[in-house]
Image (cartoon, helix red, strand yellow):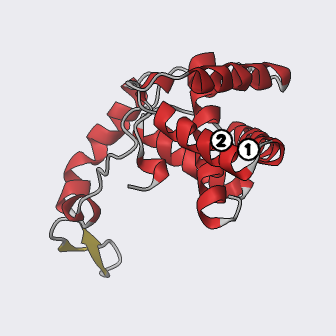
Amino acid sequence: MPGYCRQAWQFGLTDLSQRSLTRSSILPQASEIVQGPDSKPIVRSPRTRQNRGMENEAKQDTPQAPALDLSQRKGLLFALTAERLSVYYEHDAWLTVAQGASLAADWLHRSKLPMSLKERRAISDLSDSFARELANTLSPQAGLFTAHEMMEGLDHRYQSSVTTDLLEECERLLQEHQLDAPPAA
């Protein structure tokens, strides 16, 4: 199982291994052809035609999801750092900031948690510098051990002093870079 598919529930991220897309949810239902106002045929999915009004109502009635709190941001930074270290020690390559932001967006989307691209990029950049700092200060064996501990730490059943210390460091880094709270609107 790839590292980015591990569970990180304790950080406010739900099961990262969920794959909710199925062939039936991607492909539209059978389409029908209707006559447009200018006599050109229009292909319209029955699902779209039936639910058009209800979707607009649902968008208006749906309350805005709350912004991520400090523990969720700390968990996201921890998970991104763990993934970066894991990729580095497995493939001798670093994820880019954009790849980290995309990975964060995927995790957040599955958990239905909102975060702007600017914030995701900032946390991705912070995880990149933190992961590189860890890799530069640790021996290869200690770095591998730390990456393994961090990946194991994404599971709520796993407890270790290494993950606890690294989570505290993630919190300190977020506060130091003023990423511990959502930006004021």
Q: How many marks?
A: 2
Give left or right: position of 181 versus 114: right
Q: Nearer the viewer, residue 102 or 53?
A: 102
Give left or right: position of 172 versus 76: right
What secondary structure is marked by label 1?
Answer: helix
Give left or right: position of 94 versus 41: right
Q: Seen from this angle, which residue lies furthest bottom?
A: 40
Give the residue type at disc 1.
Answer: Ala
Q: Position of residue 176 (x, y in %)?
A: 84, 21
Q: Residue at x 68, y 65 (%)?
A: 92
Q: Residue at x 67, y 26 (%)?
A: 166
**Image quadrant containing the N terminus:** bottom left
Q: Please rate how many residues cluster around mark 1, counting C-alpha atoms within 10 Å: few if below 14, some from 14 to 19, many from 20.
A: many
Q: Nearer the viewer, residue 90 or 59?
A: 90
Question: In which quadrant of the rendered view does residue 161 lie?
Answer: top right
Q: Earlier in the sequence, mark 2 or mark 1?
A: 2
Tag of residue 131: 1
Q: Is residue 156 visible?
A: yes
Q: Which residue is mark 2?
A: 81
Q: Is residue 1 above or below residue 124?
A: below
What secondary structure is marked by label 2?
Answer: helix
The answer to the question of whether label 2 and label 1 lie on touching residues, with beta carbons closer than 8 A, is: yes
State the separation of the CA atoms marked 2 and 1: 5 Å
Q: Residue at x 79, y 19 (%)?
A: 175
Q: Position of residue 150 (x, y in %)?
A: 56, 36
Q: Is residue 20 above or below residue 70?
A: below
Q: Is residue 69 visible?
A: no
Q: Residue at x 64, y 57 (%)?
A: 89
**Image quadrant containing the C terminus:** top right
Give the residue type at disc 2.
Answer: Thr
